[in-house]
Image (cartoon, rainbow, N blue to C red):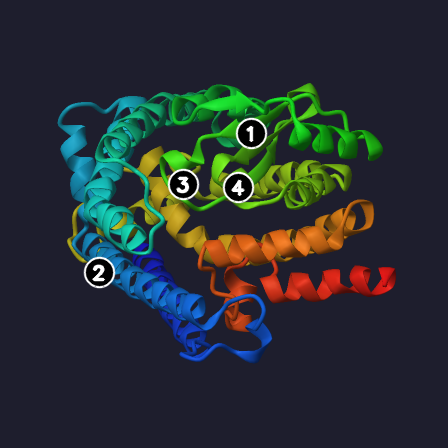
């Protein structure tokens, strides 16, 4: 049975890699050196050519990184690398919690060391070349130190709690863990901007003035209670602009990147925020939490079937990671979770497709809200400006959109919004 699991895992990894390559190739068939007719009035020829070069370089970079990652995973699996790591840890401790923390810590460190040169190249070469990067070496280093400490505190604490529950309750652990994960997810949703963001960015309340007056006027019009409007120093790291809505209840807030304010008019900014408010008014935020909670529950239930203590299935799953090495791997929570994660990836992939489809539907609905309640032309202009300033690929292959995009393409969104413009003419 262990051999069957081993070859299934290998097949999943290979299939995943091939699907990524096929989708990348399909996407590349839509590239063009000449400005397509449907993009006239959005891109000019020079800017469009620049966006195509940006897309080509990013895809080549992604190909190298994903190929290297795929090959390392193959070697680790076939040589029983995960078993060797586990065996080395067993020389120091057999306690399930520190053993798991060390195991995931070593794998995480190895992954970080592998990806670091690529991340440095992406930030300081690719993004720099196209005029996006504003990250200093100091900020880059501090970000990773803070991220590492945050992973140790939050990630390590959560893993420790989950294993404690598993060891204490046995087969029904998934129900309790589901409750813990749901609480954690809601807590983070409410307090992310208060607790996590300040570790990396400075948030300041939007000053009184025409923009704040326009935002508050619109919020009052649509019955959206809003006290917290913040500006975040996104320019500290990149020229790319963004805005987001976060929190629940009295903790909800709207956050604008300073780069967004620099590049857009008051009307465009209010239109963007009208879109974000639309998500809340249409209960997309709540639906997202409910769907994520359901997805987590399904995953934990299936996981509980695969890691039951002293079961033949759980033992076979752990032994699958010995690969062709013949090393005997002791059944444990962390080995079982790793093997299950590799087997679960196809189901996770299909769930992701469903979630992306729902997300795209929600984006259309939020656009409609902004178009009806505020100004469709202002939103269209804002979306065009965001895409052009970020050198976005505006003609992705439909299959690429289906598999990867959580938002409709710009042209799809503009086409939907044009209905409101036509209606008001």
Residue at mark 4: 260
Label ID, residue 71: 2
Q: Position of residue 24 (x, y in %)?
A: 40, 70
Labelled pair 4, 2 in contact (Cβ < 8 Å): no
Q: Earlier in the sequence, mark 4 or mark 2?
A: 2
- Whole-angstrom CA distance, mark 3 to mark 4, is 55 Å
The crowding category of the residue bearing disc 1, from other C-alpha atoms within 10 Å (few below 14, some 14 to 19, many at least 20), is some
Occupied quadrant, residue 265:
top right
Q: Earlier in the sequence, mark 3 or mark 4?
A: 4
The crowding category of the residue bearing disc 3, from other C-alpha atoms within 10 Å (few below 14, some 14 to 19, many at least 20), is few
Q: Earlier in the sequence, mark 1 or mark 4?
A: 1
Nearer the viewer's eye, disc 2 or disc 3?
A: 2
- Whole-angstrom CA distance, mark 2 to mark 3, is 31 Å
Q: Earlier in the sequence, mark 3 or mark 1?
A: 1
Question: At numbered mark 3, what does the secondary structure look like: helix, strand or loop?
Answer: loop
Residue at x 33% of width, y 56% of height: 130
Residue 329 seen in this snapshot:
no
The crowding category of the residue bearing disc 4, from other C-alpha atoms within 10 Å (few below 14, some 14 to 19, many at least 20), is many
Labelled pair 3, 4 in contact (Cβ < 8 Å): no
Nearer the viewer's eye, disc 4 or disc 2?
A: 4
């Amino acid at each position: 049975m262990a051999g069957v699991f081993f070859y299934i895992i290998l097949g999943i990894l290979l299939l995943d890699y091939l699907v990524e390559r096929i989708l990348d190739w399909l996407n590349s068939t839509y590239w063009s050196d000449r400005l397509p007719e449907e993009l006239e009035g959005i891109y000019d020829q020079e800017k469009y050519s620049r966006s195509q070069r940006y897309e080509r370089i990013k895809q080549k970079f992604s190909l190298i990184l994903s190929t290297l990652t795929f090959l390392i995973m193959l070697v680790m699996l076939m040589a029983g690398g995960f078993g060797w790591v586990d065996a080395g840890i067993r020389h120091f401790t057999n306690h399930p919690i520190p053993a798991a923390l060390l195991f995931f810590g070593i794998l995480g460190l190895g992954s970080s060391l592998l990806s670091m040169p690529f991340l440095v190249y992406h930030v300081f070469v690719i993004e720099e070349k196209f005029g996006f990067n504003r990250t200093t070496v100091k900020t880059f280093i501090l970000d990773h130190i803070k991220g590492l400490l945050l992973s140790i505190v939050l990630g390590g604490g959560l893993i420790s709690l989950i294993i404690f529950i598993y060891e204490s309750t046995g087969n029904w652990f998934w129900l309790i863990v589901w409750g813990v994960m749901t609480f954690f997810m809601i807590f983070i949703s409410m307090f992310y901007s208060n607790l996590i963001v300040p570790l990396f960015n400075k948030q300041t309340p939007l000053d009184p003035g025409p923009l704040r007056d326009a935002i508050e006027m619109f919020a009052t019009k649509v019955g959206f209670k809003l006290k917290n409007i913040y500006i975040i120093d996104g320019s500290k790291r990149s020229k790319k602009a963004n805005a987001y809505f976060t929190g629940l209840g009295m903790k909800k807030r709207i956050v604008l990147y300073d780069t967004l304010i620099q590049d857009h008019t008051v009307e465009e900014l209010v239109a963007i925020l009208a879109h974000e408010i639309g998500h809340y008014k249409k209960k997309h935020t709540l639906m997202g939490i409910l769907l994520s909670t359901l997805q987590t529950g399904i995953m934990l239930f299936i996981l509980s079937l695969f890691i039951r203590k002293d079961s033949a299935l759980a033992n076979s799953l752990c032994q699958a990671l010995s690969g062709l090495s013949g090393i005997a791997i002791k059944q444990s929570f962390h080995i079982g979770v790793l093997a299950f994660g590799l087997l679960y990836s196809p189901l996770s992939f299909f769930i992701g497709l469903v979630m992306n489809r729902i997300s795209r539907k929600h984006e259309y609905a939020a656009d409609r809200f902004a178009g009806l309640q505020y100004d469709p032309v202002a939103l269209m202009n804002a979306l065009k400006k965001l895409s052009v300033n970020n050198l976005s690929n505006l003609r992705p292959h439909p299959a690429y959109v289906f598999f990867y995009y959580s938002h409709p393409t710009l042209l799809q969104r503009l086409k939907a919004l044009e209905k409101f413009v036509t209606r008001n003419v």
